[in-house]
Amino acid sequence: MRLLLVEDDALQSHHLRLALIQAGFAVDIVADGVEAEFMGGSEPYDVIVLDLGLPGRSGLDVLRHWRAADNATPVLILTARDAWHEKVDGFKAGADDYLGKPFHAAELIARLHALLRRSNAQPHGPLRVAGIELNEETQQALIPATGARLDLTGTEFRLLRYFMLHPGRVLSKTRLVEHVYDFETERDSNVLEVYINRLRRKLGRDSIATRRGQGYIFSNAELS
């Protein structure tokens, strides 16, 4: 899943980026409100973490402009822990959740997982689709019917999680690449095919079906 982190504290953004990457997110970072508004409005993010005290343009103004432009990407705002008025203003501006500073990265990641579930109409708890359970902490795919526990690389994990959050939908190569890789990574659809084939070998050849000229669809032919 692709995430935009908007934070002007360089040290904090560095530590958060490492934690988020380890948790399976493709992370882009911006440090001012003007660039944040542009990136959040032009790139297809799955979720955004937004600090309110930004140079150039306030986080609240950025959020208001996104929502006015019908940008519905889930947004978690970061506030000072005792600034209750910022939380109220953030929700009024269209925030989906908030987290007070200081905080533990583990709580941020848990809240982001919950936001992604809600935004994709998935139930709370472990992500289960077509006979697969995805353990987001260990980044393993579990097959309860057989007891198999499959290790995944970082890219395999991000790709499978995106498929499982969008079951039954045809997903184009372009869309998958945009949501699996960050802005700085060289995007090659041929490399994406390699990872899709790796997932097929682990989960079954029919687990991901090809729709010629359209893309791929996560199937339950062998897994249900």
Image (cartoon, rainbow, N blue to C red):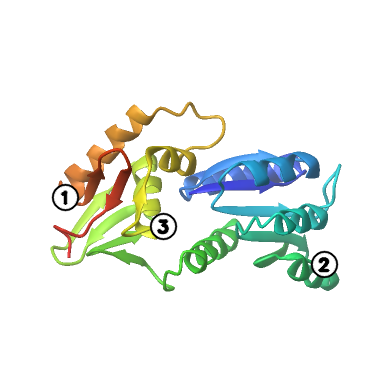
Crowd class of label 2 (few under 14; some 14 to 19; many from 20; radius 10 Å)? some
Residue located 61% across and 40% down the image: 28
Query: 10 Å neighbourhood of mark 1: few (<14), some, or many (≥20)?
Result: some
SS at circle 2: helix
The residue that mark 1 highlights is 206
What distance separates the C-alpha of mark 2 from that of mark 3? 31 Å
CB atoms at circles 2 and 3 under 8 Å apart? no
Q: Residue at x 22, y 64 (%)?
A: 131
Q: x%, y% of residue 20?
A: 54, 48
Query: Count the marks: how many?
Result: 3
Amino acid tagged 3: Glu
Q: What residue type is labelled 1?
A: Asp
Q: Position of residue 39 (x, y in %)?
A: 67, 41
Q: Within the image, what quadrant is residue 56 found in?
A: top right
The answer to whether mark 2 and mark 1 are in CB contact below 8 A is no
Kindly report the distance in space between the C-alpha atoms of the residues bearing marks 2 and 1: 49 Å
Q: Name the residue under label 2.
A: 86
To which residue does mark 3 refer? 137
Asked whether residue 46 is in view, the answer is: yes
Residue 171 lies, in percent from the top left, at 37, 47
**Does residue 211 lie above or below 167 as drawn?**
above
Q: Which amino acid does label 2 sit on?
A: Glu
Taking 66 as reference, is 116 left or right?
left
Kindly report the distance in space between the C-alpha atoms of the residues bearing marks 1 and 3.
26 Å
N-term mark: 2 or 3: 2
Is residue 103 something one can see in this rendering? no
Q: Nearer the viewer, mark 2 or mark 3?
A: 2
Q: Is mark 1 on a helix, strand or loop?
A: loop
Q: Is mark 3 on a helix, strand or loop?
A: loop
Q: Earlier in the sequence, mark 1 or mark 3?
A: 3
Please tell me which residue is depicted at 66% across the width and 57% down the height of the picture: 70
